[in-house]
Amino acid sequence: MGQKVNPRVLRLGATTTWSSRWFAGKNYKDLLLEDYKIRTALMEKLKAAGVSEIEIERSINNLKITAYVSKPGMVIGRGGTGLEDLKNYLQKEFIKKLNTKAQYKIDIKVEPIKEPNLNAYLVAKNIAEQLVKRLPAKRVLVSTQEKVMGSGALGLRVVLGGRIGGAEIARREKLQVGTVPLSTIRENISYASYPALTKKGYIGVKVWIHKEEEK
């Protein structure tokens, strides 16, 4: 079962939590669509800062957004001007287009990622970017293994699927080192998938990283 479900979903309430935290009634679908558009826009806008996740919390008229980035200085800016610009962008250009009736009080918080090489999303994104640049898949996997395991990971699994290296027939490439116990709920597993759009088509990148328990 551990290989057929999202490792984060399997561990909800145990070692992980929800990315969106709020309650809704009849307007559930509207809020869900808002969250999706907000998250998509911020992931694109903060791409250069190494964003890996956007968490959203809602109360009656409050919207609290937490961005996890590897380069927080690029988001915060000098004297917090970057956060104000980001807040104005959401308030004026984005939130009003989503729901003209709702007036949200937006609070944006930036959390730094201590070790980017232990974040599955950033690792998968890095692999995808290298594949787009037509670097050999095996060399990319080996260098990724050295970085991740050198950063203190207990295990790493990477699966590539598609026309790797421009091959005529799609195939899968798999790398696993250390231990990656996917069925053990108490283990700290970071998982992400990221598509690499090459000239020959998409190559799917899936990454599982087994990390030590956070104290």
Image: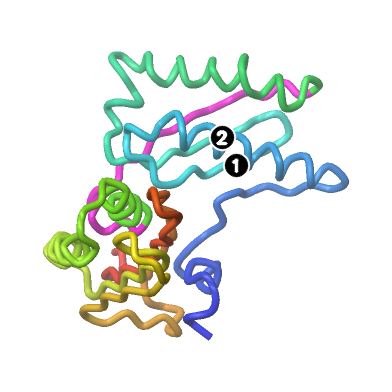
Q: Position of residue 116 (x, y in %)?
A: 25, 50
Question: Does residue 151 appear in the picture of this structure?
Answer: no
Q: Amino acid at mark 1?
A: Glu
Horizontal side of residue 23 vs 69, given as left or right: right
Q: Position of residue 57 (x, y in %)?
A: 60, 42
Q: Position of residue 48 (x, y in %)?
A: 33, 32
Horizontal side of residue 102 vs 81, given as left or right: right
The answer to which quarter of the image holds residue 151 is: bottom left
Horizontal side of residue 152 vs 22, given as left or right: left
Measuring 73% from the left and 40% from the top, which residue is drawn there? 31
Q: Secondary structure at mark 1?
A: strand
Q: Mark 1 and mark 2: span between their CA atoms?
A: 5 Å
Q: Position of residue 73 (x, y in %)?
A: 27, 27
To which residue does mark 1 refer?
57
Q: Amino acid at mark 2?
A: Lys
Q: Secondary structure at mark 2?
A: strand
Horizontal side of residue 35 vs 132, given as left or right: right
To which residue does mark 2 refer?
64
Q: Which residues are magenta?
A: 102-120
Determine whether 83 is above or below 186 in the image. Answer: above
Measuring 38% from the left and 35% from the top, which residue is drawn there? 47
